[in-house]
Image: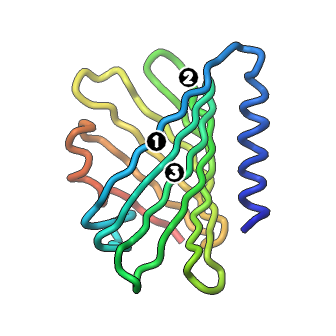
Amino acid sequence: MKNKILALAALTGLALGATASNAQELTVTANAGFETEYVFRGVELADDSYQASIDLAYGDYYASIWTNQPTADNEANEVDYTAGYLFSINEDITADIGAIVYDYPDTPGNNETIEAFIGFTYDAAKFATPSIYTYYDFDLESITSKPNLMPEFTSILWSKQFVTYN
């Protein structure tokens, strides 16, 4: 686990260093909230939970730490580490490439997994921003694709739009 986090941190450091000469501004955002249900790719992982994240962005590069902390003792907490590169292919299409480490520190045994992802977003529509993301989990050796065809404000209704291939 430590090696995966160090590799992700090194990737982020290299990415941020690669654009240091462009006089970009580092942005930092944070948020926190309480959720009555935590659902990930159609599977409920926890009931009442506190969630928080810290996000860093520098030019086209970004990194974040996100956590879900359930209030119930029988549900495992989760900490996710993400790093990526977001760039425009043209004025309408954006690409996103990165990796996510999912860590479950309270779970015994193999308690983390890492995914690489690539995503494309079409930003020319007036009322919607359709996108598709594909993830490859190195530990589970599975591919998951998640299309989003609805407007952003209704995408929560389509949270189970994903396909997993093993």
* Residue denoted by label 1: 30
Give the image quarter of residue 136. Answer: bottom right
Q: Residue at x 62, y 60 (%)?
A: 101
Say whether disc 3 or disc 2 marks the residue closer to the N-terminus: 2
- Mark 1 surroundings: few (<14), some (14-19) or many (≥20) residues within 10 A: few
Q: Nearer the viewer, residue 83 or 137?
A: 83
Q: Which mark is residue 89?
A: 2
Tell me the amino acid under the disc marked 2: Ile
x and y, in percent, of residue 164 in the image: 46, 65
User: In the rendered structure, which amino acid carries the disc numbered 3?
Assistant: Thr
Q: Is residue 67 left or right of residue 21?
A: left
Look at mark 3 in the image and give the residue it sits on: 134
- Up the image or down, 109 lies above or below 89; here it is below
The quadrant of the picture occupied by the C terminus is: bottom right
- Horizontal side, residue 117 vs residue 123: left or right: right
Mark 3 surroundings: few (<14), some (14-19) or many (≥20) residues within 10 A: some
Sequence order check, earlier mark of 1 and 3: 1
Q: Residue at x 52, y 18 (%)?
A: 90
